[in-house]
């Protein structure tokens, strides 16, 4: 297996490197410890103040030095990003960035003050996926302010928009001297996105997948053909499935395969699960079925401990621009503690390796633990 690499900027003109992660939830408790917290009042049935989530975390792991600076929540992840220097950085932003008071009565509502947007720019995020079940937690006005805030700091968004045309439009990122990375984002109703959140001609909303069908594949393929050109890498970022459990439904696997076979997609970036799920390399193209939560305020909340949702993963992919094939896929394990991402112990990294390896073996893919405590995906070259 190859060692850690920064090939994305080392002069290899054919290799484009990506950083991907799962759900980034900078609302509620996270927002409260940042320099410019929102009004903490919540419309949740059991917790009425976002400060309550800070208190739970502190009871579990000790005091948080609030207010924290904007880099705090990223913790050791920032050093990894500096060392590996990926060409493009993509997250699923599962938080409305707004001061809206239009709280949608759905049980859980994530909101971050726009004045805290530097907590994203400090990590040099290039693209935020918004096709998820929290982006309209604070109504249409909350989504519109989120779009405006991201635009104001030159961070691209995808998967939601002021109308259906914008919601379906991909984000396109130029990688100097190499090619382009094109991101299409979709939200599936299986992740809990209300059908009424679908964007329309005259209504803001998300790019909603009603079904994982051949008809949907054909629609995606048509959209990809309109923009893809030689040297482009196309990512389909999909918010789908339940929060808990390792099982991957057959329709997800079949849909992912067809997006690669017929849709012109090179990378499947799946999210919604609160923990990392199995990985497949299909026809030399990576399928991340569930990347797990990356940033959240769940510390001190009981339940589902067997899934170790305190652990998170950074996914670093090297993709050949000439053919869209995977060159390498490495992951850095981290632990969420005191609302900060910290390096894991060897024991925790081995737990993640064993868990991911067991699930990925179902797809003839394996996961190894390396001496530097990172994980590396192995697969049969030319297989799939």
Image (cartoon, helix red, strand yellow):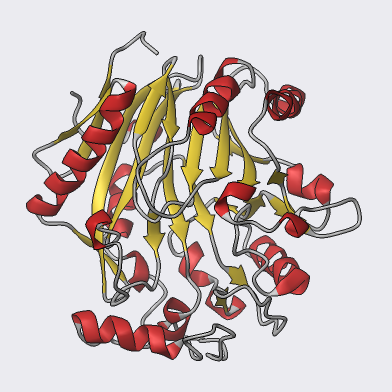
Where does the image place residue 242, in percent across and percent down from the top left? Answer: 47, 51
Where does the image place residue 212, in percent across and percent down from the top left? Answer: 63, 33
Where does the image place residue 343, in percent across and percent down from the top left? Answer: 19, 58
Q: Please, is residue 104 above or below residue 192 in the view? A: below
Q: Please, is residue 109 above or below residue 207 in the view? A: below
Asked where in the image residue 197 lies, by quadrant, the reply is bottom right
Specify the farthest residue to the top: 382
Q: Please, is residue 2 above or below residue 50 in the view? A: above
- The structure residue drawn at horizontal position 51% and vertical position 86%, both measured from the top left corner, is 36
Quick check: can you spot residue 132?
A: yes
Specify the farthest residue to the right: 202
Q: Is residue 133 left or right of residue 51?
A: right
Name the one closer to the observer, 110 or 234: 110
Quick check: can you spot residue 16?
A: no
Q: Please, is residue 250 above or below residue 312 in the view? A: above
Name the one closer to the observer, 289 or 337: 289
Task: Please state, as top left, top right, bottom left or bottom right, where the C terminus lies in the image.
Answer: top left
- The structure residue drawn at horizontal position 42% and vertical position 74%, both measured from the top left corner, is 70
Task: Please state, as top left, top right, bottom left or bottom right, where the N terminus lies in the image.
Answer: top left
- The structure residue drawn at horizontal position 54% and vertical position 59%, both measured from the top left corner, is 93
Name the one closer to the observer, 243 or 279: 243
Number of on-image labels: 0
Where does the image place residue 240, in percent across and percent down from the top left? Answer: 54, 45
Q: Is residue 242 left or right of residue 79?
A: right
Q: Is residue 115 left or right of residue 1?
A: right
- The structure residue drawn at horizontal position 47% and vertical position 70%, both measured from the top left corner, is 119
């Amino acid at each position: 297996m190859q060692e850690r690499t920064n090939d994305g900027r080392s002069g290899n003109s054919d290799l484009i490197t990506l950083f991907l992660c799962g759900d980034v939830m900078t609302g509620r408790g996270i927002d409260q410890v940042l320099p410019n917290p929102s009004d903490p009042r919540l419309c949740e049935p059991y917790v009425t103040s976002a400060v309550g989530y800070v208190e739970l975390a502190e009871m579990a792991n000790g005091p948080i030095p609030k207010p924290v600076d904007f880099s705090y929540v990223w913790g050791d992840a920032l050093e990894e990003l500096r060392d590996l220097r990926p060409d493009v950085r993509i997250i699923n932003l599962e938080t409305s960035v707004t001061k809206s008071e239009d709280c949608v009565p759905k049980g859980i509502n994530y909101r971050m003050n726009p004045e805290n947007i530097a907590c994203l720019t400090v990590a040099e995020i290039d693209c935020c996926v918004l096709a998820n079940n929290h982006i309209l937690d604070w109504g249409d006005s909350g989504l519109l302010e989120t779009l405006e805030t991201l635009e104001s700091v030159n961070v691209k968004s995808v998967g939601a928009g002021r109308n259906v045309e914008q919601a379906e439009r991909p984000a396109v990122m130029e990688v100097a001297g190499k090619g382009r990375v094109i991101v299409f984002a979709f939200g599936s109703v299986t992740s809990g996105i209300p059908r009424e959140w679908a964007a329309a001609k005259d209504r803001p909303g998300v790019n909603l997948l009603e079904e994982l069908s051949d008809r949907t594949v054909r629609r995606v393929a048509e959209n990809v053909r309109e923009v893809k050109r030689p040297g482009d890498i196309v990512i389909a970022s999909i918010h789908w499935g339940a929060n808990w459990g390792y099982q991957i439904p057959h329709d997800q696997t079949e849909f992912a395969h067809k997006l690669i076979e017929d849709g012109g997609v090179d990378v499947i970036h799946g999210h919604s699960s609160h923990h990392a799920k199995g990985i497949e390399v299909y026809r030399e193209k990576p399928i991340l079925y569930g990347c797990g939560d990356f940033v959240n305020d769940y510390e001190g909340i009981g339940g589902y401990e067997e899934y170790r949702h305190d652990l998170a993963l950074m996914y670093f992919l090297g993709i050949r621009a000439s053919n869209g094939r995977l060159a390498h896929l490495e992951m850095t394990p981290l632990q969420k503690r005191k609302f900060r991402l910290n390096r894991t112990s060897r024991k925790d990294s081995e737990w993640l390796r064993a868990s991911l390896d067991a699930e990925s073996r179902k797809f003839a893919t394996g996961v190894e633990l390396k001496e530097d405590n990172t994980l590396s995906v192995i697969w049969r070259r030319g297989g799939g």
